Image (tube, rainbow, N blue to C red):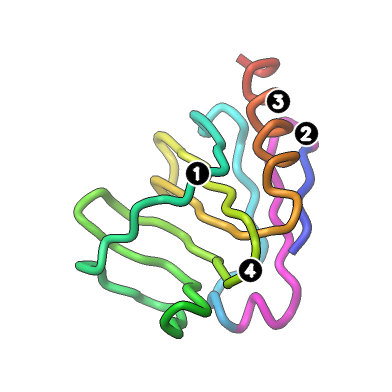
Amino acid sequence: MRLNIEDQKLKIKLNPLEKVFSFRGSIEIPLDHITSASTKRPDRNWKVIRAPGAYLPFVLRVGTYYSGQGKELWYSTRGKGYLTIELSDWDYRRIVLTLGDNEIWAERINQAVRVSS
């Protein structure tokens, strides 16, 4: 996956295999809908409905999940750092990704959100 910030949007471009597993295409989130980004591993609620998506315990959690907190998009794999993006007034309440440069992206996103406010 590739992330980019341009035109006041966070753009998440999924590769073909990621699109298959997540049942979604690339995503564009207006910066004014992002409240924060962190490298904290989010709490996993096992009382969720996955629709659609893929799950392999301790290895892969991908797709749209519905819980008591709302709708979340996950693309997490083992061995990489978490990037948790909290949202407001948007289709998802949270987006959870794992990537190697998660700390850099958390700072970039938070900086872009501060500048756009």
Of the two numbered discs 1 and 4 on the same chain, state the one appearing first in sequence: 1
- Asked if disc 1 and disc 2 are in contact, CB closer than 8 Å, the reply is no
Report the residue marked by disc 1: 40
Quarter where residue 51 is shown: bottom left
* Circles 1 and 3: CB atoms closer than 8 Å: no
From the image, which quarter does the C terminus lie in?
Answer: top right
- Picture coordinates of residue 22 (x, y %)? 54, 75
Task: Please give the name of the residue rendered at 33% of the width and 60% of the height, measured from the top-left corner.
Answer: 44
Label 2 SS: loop
Q: How many marks?
A: 4
Magenta extent? 6-20
Identify the mark nearer the N-term, 1 or 3. Answer: 1
* Res 64 → quadrant: bottom left
Dot 3 falls on a residue whose secondary structure is helix
Q: Amino acid at mark 3?
A: Ala
Assess whether mark 2 and mark 4 are in contact (beta carbons under 8 angstroms). Answer: no
Which residue matches tag 2? 7
Front residue of 101 and 89 = 101
Whole-angstrom CA distance, mark 4 to mark 2, is: 31 Å
Q: Earlier in the sequence, mark 4 or mark 2?
A: 2
Answer whether labels 1 and 4 touch (C-beta < 8 Å): no
Q: Name the N-terminal-most of marks 4 and 3.
A: 4
Per the rendering, the mark at residue 112 is 3
Quadrant of image for the N terminus = bottom right
Left or right for 39, reference 48: right
Of the numbered discs 1 and 2, the one sitting upstream in the chain is 2
Please state which amino acid type lies under the numbered disc 1.
Answer: Lys
Front residue of 41 and 105? 41
Is 55 left or right of 39, judged from the image as shown?
left
Which numbered disc, 3 or 2, marks the residue that appears first in the sequence?
2
Q: Could you classify mark 1 by the number of other residues whose Cα lies within 10 Å: few (under 14), some (14-19), or many (20 or more)?
A: some
